[in-house]
Image (cartoon, rainbow, N blue to C red):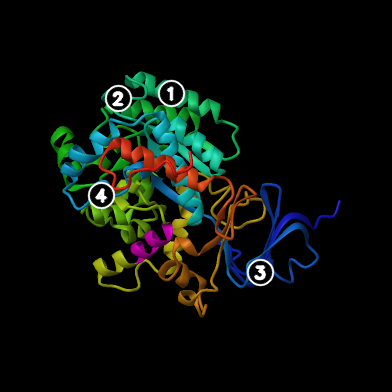
Amino acid sequence: MNPKKADILIENGVVLTMDEGGQFQRGAVAIEDDRIAAVGDEEALQGWKAKRVIDARGGIIMPGLVNAHTHAAMTCFRGIADDLPLMNWLNDHIFPAEAKLDVEKVYRGSLLACAEMILSGTTTFCDMYLFEEAVARAADEAGMRAVVGEVLYDFPSPNYGDIEKGFAYTESMAARYKDHPRISVAVEPHSPYLCAPELLQQAAELSRNAGILFVIHLSETKSEVETIRERYRKTPVAHLADLGVLGPGVLACHCVELAENDIALLAANGVKVAHNPESNMKLASGIAPIPELLEAGVCVGLGTDGCAINNNLDLFSEMDTAAKLHKASHLDPTVMDARTVLSMATIWSARALGIDDITGSLSVGKRADVIVVDTRRPHLTPLYRPASHLVYAAGGADVDTTIINGRVVMENRQLLSLDVDEVMDAVNRIAFEIGGAAYRPSPRDAN
Ligand SMILES: [Zn+2]
């Protein structure tokens, strides 16, 4: 057997590994089956033969981006209502629209999210929503890597009914996807304000016993902190710490309103954080103390949150925002440098999801989740430092090729795993059914 034989060879690009391998100016990546077989400069990859060669044309070859927090099916509500106070937005627009959801709509909305993510270089996402089995199915069909979890809360769910059935639903999904190469399941209680202490503890127990991730919205707004203080006389973070819920298998989303002691608690317990700057800005929730969390040694990943809030799933614009937001709020251009933000969107997000052993960087033996960013474009010329362009100049539409688990799912901006027109038409029909959509689907649209 020739050890230098690969299925795919991506060559003629700047390789950014996002691990100790660093950067190769004229580099290449060899993919064998679902794994990265070799990565290095042209010299190191000399002699490698592949069935399929992808010419990166001087572009950037890097790990696929990892979206640490989203609600994929919320694509159905993209732009349904904006510029409103959080409670009006939720009560008058989002909750009534979500009441019309069913498994089919969540499936179609998630397919659209997957299309958008693949087209903008995201290869993995962590999801929380209703009818999550439909999200898993959509991610699987799209060829994406995903961590999925059914949202759990105190009141009956339109999907599973009472909370005990919610736990049963989560457990059966976890069992079903146990050996899946790309999909894994998390236990996802919504938040400390919608979940009783018993629910949170039961979720933590399931997370530990089954070895699955625990995902929760935490300290997202001032009003959440006030509510939890009224109920339990402590901060949301201290509340979870006292319940024995916090630990290294916990992913806390948002963490905007943190007291100093909260940061110490998150760090001491090895809790991971998902930062969603555009969502926090648009809902005027505030600015999460990310430089302070990083300084304390907390692993922080980057997420877009749902499309009804953001209103897109493009992690490139999220990186740009993350870098600039903290510079402005600290009046210090050195905080959140491009390299830090890029780590947040790749290897740290993967670590936050507990899957950095298989994705998040271009290392030999890891699964082949690789993207190629086309830099032969006016707004990306010349190219001095790849990290700078990726954070401050590039957008999702500059991604030319997306490979997930060794499979090419997008090439030359053509989505190969899904019929993108069919996916868009289906969500247009859903929006029309929900009401208020500006576009009325016509019979000319494909079915
Ligand atoms: Zn969220």
Q: Which mark is residue 169?
A: 1
Q: Which mark is residue 27?
A: 3
Q: Secondary structure at mark 4?
A: helix
Of label 2 and label 3, which has the lower sequence position? 3
Q: Which residue is mark 4?
A: 261
Q: Is residue 303 left or right of residue 137?
A: left
Return the x and y of residue 301 as percentages of the image width and height: 41, 53
Q: Is residue 419 left or right of residue 428?
A: right
Disc 2 and disc 3: Cα gap in Å? 53 Å
The kind of residue tagged 2 is Glu
Give the residues in magenta: 315-323
Which residue does the image show at 31% across and 59% down from the upper left?
292
Of label 4 and label 3, which has the lower sequence position? 3
Q: Which mark is residue 198?
A: 2
Ligand 1 is found in the corner quadrant, namely top left
Instruction: From the viewer's side, name the closer residue of 94 and 11.
Output: 94
Q: Is residue 219 left or right of residue 297?
A: left
Occupied quadrant, residue 182: top right
Instruction: Please name which of the two marks, 4 or 1, marks the residue nearer to the observer.
Output: 1
Occupied quadrant, residue 233: top left
Disc 4 and disc 3: Cα gap in Å? 45 Å
Q: How many marks?
A: 4
Disc 4 and disc 1: Cα gap in Å? 35 Å
